[in-house]
Amino acid sequence: MPYIPLIPLSELPENSHKSVRSGKKNFALFHYNGIITALENACIHKGGDLGQGFIQTLEDGELYVACPWHGWQYNLKTGKAPHGYRDRQAVYEVIVDNGMISVSEEPLSKAFRAAHDVDPVADLRNLEYQTTEKSINVLGISTTNMNRDLPRPSTSETALQQALDFAASEFGASTKMIKIRDLNFRHCEGYYSRHERACTWPCSISEMDGEDGMNEVYRSMVLWADAVILATPIRWGNASSLFYKMAERLNTVQNQITVHDRVLIKNKVASFIITGGQDNVQGVAGNLNSFFTDLGFTFPPFNFVGWSRGWIAEDTENNYNQFFRSRYVKRSVRELVTNTIRLVMQIKDMDVSHLHTPKPKISEAGSLSE
Ligand code: FES
């Protein structure tokens, strides 16, 4: 079998590993326990760089490399995934001759990506949209936080419930409320920072964990909703921290535009309810508008309702009562819903086979070498 000379042994000391390119081929070389092994470098999941991976000893006592992108693991000698998985990375024969490491041109065993029996996010992967020409699906997202055992009145959530009730009674809309505080999900783990293609759709955290609470948001927002009404309190002049936790996990939606020019959110409308004991309604609205426009949402005129009693309104116990009695709130919530649903009806006919996305794209990214 022909062999490809790669690097001198001195460049791969014991307890080290690295990726080495030769022409179009890229190998991950490992030197552990006195043995040198070689795997195909590109992870079979999404192409992560195994030569930059982490070495781990698993329960079978064998050494594995964990891909630095999302942690898929491969046995250093056999290329096999851990017990319970049938995936396998390609393995190359290694010879060391005259202090030079060479690998076989062809793999001893080829890579194999098993079809997983259960794909918990198949509907997200296949973008099984649930909207129709006639649907008016209104999703409420409440981002306020509270103790489930000691619930307290919330201005933002009360107004959101009023909005959903009005959408159902006035327009016959189907409605759904998601309370972010009830969902159990991990923070975004920033895989994008490793490589632009490491932020995937569906999110790799969802792929790893079918019980990931964000799946409820992805399904409802991307697949089901025609309109999203998001409600947030103002915390330190900003939206709630739960909003940001959710927003960071929505990188997976926005990065599809950046990396693949692929828009997942089409013909969907967003509006907001922003309430705070003190101020900065406009600042929060600007932030929310900026984020939701980056996802692909469309906005009706006057797309937020705000409530704030001002800088010195420290008598917070009076806030909810005043809010609840306010004729302004009742009227403006109804008008927000009306504007939102009317826009949903208008844009149903828009051609969204391709949406222009005047955003930065990976294909246009500059580099230091330019
Ligand atoms: S690319 Fe390797 S685990 Fe995702």
Image (spheres, rainbow, N blue to C red):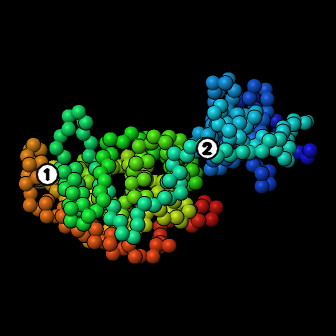
Q: Quadrant of the C terminus?
A: bottom right
Task: Residue 257 in the image: state x and y as whole percent.
Answer: 50, 63
Q: Nearer the viewer, residue 55 or 223?
A: 223
Task: Residue 255 in the image: state x and y as whole percent.
Answer: 50, 58
Residue at the image position 67 percent from the left and 36 percent from the top: 81
Task: Residue 28 in the image: state x and y as whole percent.
Answer: 73, 42
Dot label at residue 311: 1
Dot in front, 1 or 2: 2
Dot label at residue 116: 2
Residue at the image position 49 percent from the left and 42 percent from the top: 210
Spatial CA distance of label 1 from label 2 is 55 Å
Labels 1 and 2: the sequence-earlier one: 2
Dot label at residue 38: none
Q: Nearer the viewer, residue 352 or 328?
A: 352
Look at label 2 and name its amino acid: His
On the image, which quarter does residue 291 sit in?
Answer: bottom left
Q: Is residue 177 left or right of residue 215?
A: left
Look at label 1 and name its amino acid: Trp
On the image, which quarter does residue 114 sit in?
Answer: top right
Residue at the image position 36 percent from the left and 73 percent from the top: 347
Task: Residue 239 in the image: state x and y as whole percent.
Answer: 28, 51
Q: Is residue 47 left or right of residue 249?
A: right
Q: Nearer the viewer, residue 97 or 367?
A: 97
